[in-house]
Image: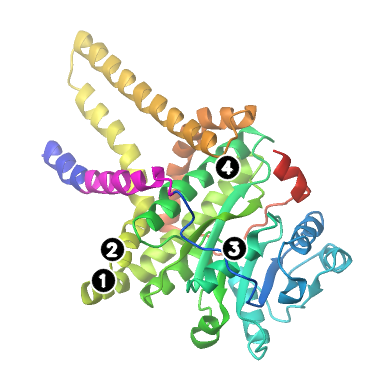
Amino acid sequence: MINTIFIIISIPLTVFGLYYFFTGLFGFFRPHKSPIKSHDPKHKFAILIAARNEEAVIGSLVHSLKEQDYPKELYDIFVIPNNCTDNTKGAAIEAGATVLNCKIPVKNKGDVLRYIFKKLKKNKDIDAYILFDADNVVDKRFISRMNDALCEGYEIAQGNRDSKNPNDTWVSGAMSISYWMLNIFYNKARINFRGSALINGTGFMVKKSIIDSEGYNTTSITEDLEYTIQSMLNDRKVMFVEDAITYDEQPLTFKQAMIQKSRWTSGEVQALKWYYIKVLKTFLKTRNPVLFDISFRLFAPIFQVVGMLMPVAVACVTLYPLNKTEFFSTLLFYIIYLAVIYIANVLFFLHNAAYYKKLKNSKVIAGAFTLPLLILTWVPIVVKCLFVTDKKWIEIKHTKNVKIHEMIKE
C-alpha cells in the first residue's frame, strides 16, 4: 500500500522535474546577437517608483535614471511615496524626481500602481511605463533597450534583475544566486524556445495602452506573478531583455530572507487558488503553450515541498523494518545519495555565479554552499502558506546606498 502511494506521488514529481530540466537547458543557449535590434529613440516613458520608507536609497536610483543614455525629454521619473514615516519624499525631490502623492489607503504595491495608472491615464504623451523598486540602481542602457523592445513590437518586457549586494552576507549571496537562476534558466530559457518570461516585480516595461484598456487588476501580495498570469490569459507574452539590467538589494539576514520568502509563497498560493482553473480552461480552449508552461509554475511550491519530503519519507519507511546491519548500510547509501545531490546543487549554483562573473566574491561562494540548506528551511514556510497566507506587507529595510558606477566596476 505504501509503495503504491509513493509511486503515485512520484509520477507527477518526475514529470515536473523533467519538465523544468529540459526547459532549463535552453538557458545554456547563447545566441550570437540579441533577439532585440537597436532602434533610434522614439517612445516616451513614465518611470514609476512606489516607495515606502526608502529615504536611504531612493536618491541613488533616481540618479542612475537621470544618467540614462536616452534623451531626457523622452522620459519622466515619478516617485510615489506611500505609508512613509521618513523623508522619502524630500530625498526623491532633492535627487530630481517628480513626486506624486498617493491619496488612498495602501495595503500593497498593487494599490499604489492602480492609483497612479488612473492618475496618468489622460496623459497621451506617455507610450509605456517602466517600473522599479526604490532600492534599485539601473544600468544606463536600460531605457534605451526597453525602447528597442517596444519598437520591435513587444508590449511587456522584463529586464535582467541582478544584485547590488551579493558580497554583503552569505544570505545576500545565496539570494543573489536564486535570482540569477531565475534569469538564466527560466526567463532566458523561455525566450530561447519562444515562450514567455515572468515579470519579476521590478525593472519591467508595459505599454500604456494595455493598462489603459485592461487596467492593473492585481490584489494578491505578489502582484508581479498575478499580472504575468493575467497577461498570458489575454494572449500576451513577456519578453526578457537580458542586457537591460537593474541591480536589486537582497536580504542581509536569515530573518529577512524568511519574511521575503513567506510573502512570495503567500502570493504564489493565492495565484494557484485564484487562477489555476481559469488557466486550465483557457489552455484547453486555445491550446496556448504559454498557459501550459505557467500551469507548472503555479504548482511549483507544492512540488518543491513534496519533492524534498519524499526522500525523507522513503528513507524512514525503508529503514524502519531493517536489522542493525542492514539499517546502517542502507543509511550510508542515503547519506551518500544526499551528498551527491548537495554537491550537484552547489556546482550548479557556482555555474550561475560564474555566468554573472561573481565567483571572486567570497559571500557568493558561501551562498552557493548554503543555498541548498536555505531552500530546506522554506519547506515549513510553504506548508504554512498553503493553509494561512500572509495578507499584510511586512517591510524589509533597505540600506545599501550604492551608485551605478560602483556596480559597473564590479
Looking at the image, which residue is at 50% across and 78% down? 217
Prevailing secondary structure of the magenta residues: helix
Residue 283 image label = 1
Of labels 4 and 2, earlier in sequence is: 4
Along the line of sight, which residue is nearer the eye, 388 or 87? 87
In magenta, the rendered stretch is 12-31
Q: Residue at x 32, y 49 (%)?
A: 23
Kindly state the secondary structure of the residue where label 2 is placed: helix
Residue annotated with mark 4: 176
Disc 4 versus disc 1: distance between alpha carbons? Answer: 33 Å
Spot occupied by residue 318 in the image (x, y as percentages of width and height): 20, 25
Q: Position of residue 169 (x, y in %)?
A: 66, 34
Establish if 193 lies above or below 208.
above
Q: Amino acid at mark 3?
A: Arg
Image quarter of residue 232: bottom left
- Would you call the spot at circle 4 few (<14 residues within 10 Å), some (14-19), or many (20 or more)? many
Image quadrant where one finds the C terminus = top right
Task: Please state the horizontal and vertical placement of residue 372, each as a whole percent of the image.
Answer: 46, 33
Farthest residue, direction bottom: 122
Residue at the outermost top position: 325
Disc 4 or 3, which lies upstream in sequence? 3
Q: Nearer the viewer, mark 2 or mark 3?
A: 3
Dot 2, how many residues are within 10 Å of its Cα: few (below 14), some (14-19), or many (20+)?
some
Query: Looking at the image, is mark 1 or mark 3 nearer the viewer?
Result: 3
